[in-house]
Amino acid sequence: AGAAAAPSADVALALLPPTVCCQCRREHAVELLFVPDCDHTLCTECARAYAARQYANPKCLEMQCPVPSCEMVLPQFVLRAVLPEADYEQYLNRSLLAVLEQGADFFRCPNADCGMVMEKIDGAAAAAAAAA
């Protein structure tokens, strides 16, 4: 007697119970994204729409779970999955720049066309580094 064959991926997905999206409240058998720290579920369509709305705000540096009473931040893998690649890269860049600019040791180049972030150093440290 041989061992039973393992079910295919299609069969395994069919055995999963439908899950309700916390935004549209519709049941979805597949294509749900989970926010791991709070266990809320979003369908791909709702996650894309939510991320796009949040991304449109240039001051948005973190995207929280869309459930109003939840304060968990959406993980990067969710944002990467639902934002267009160029938007995701720009979101990462503006988040990084905001973090760097909050530190007293960094500043953005005053040339509006540049956008580089530079480290502040005092004159004595710069002279010592140049002399070395």
Image: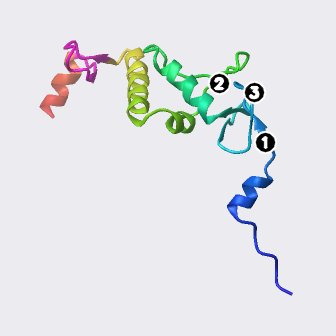
Instruction: Indicate the position of residue 124 as horizontal and vertical percent values.
Output: 20, 19
Task: Name the kind of residue labelled 1 in the image.
Answer: Pro
Tag of residue 18: 1
Relative to the observer, which residue lies in front, 35 or 98?
35
**3D distance between C-alphas at marks 1 and 3:** 12 Å
Which quarter of the figure is the N terminus placed in?
A: bottom right
For residue 112: magenta?
Answer: yes
Relative to the observer, which residue lies in front, 44 or 63?
44
Instruction: Indicate the position of residue 22 as horizontal and vertical percent values.
Output: 73, 27
Helix, strand or loop for disc 1: loop
Task: Name the kind of residue labelled 3 in the image.
Answer: Arg
Helix, strand or loop for disc 3: loop
Kindly identify which residue carries mark 2.
Answer: 65
Task: Name the kind of residue labelled 2 in the image.
Answer: Cys
Q: Is residue 15 above or below residue 132?
A: below
Tell me which numbered mark, 2 or 1, is placed earlier along the sequence: 1
The residue shown at (49%, 17%) is 60
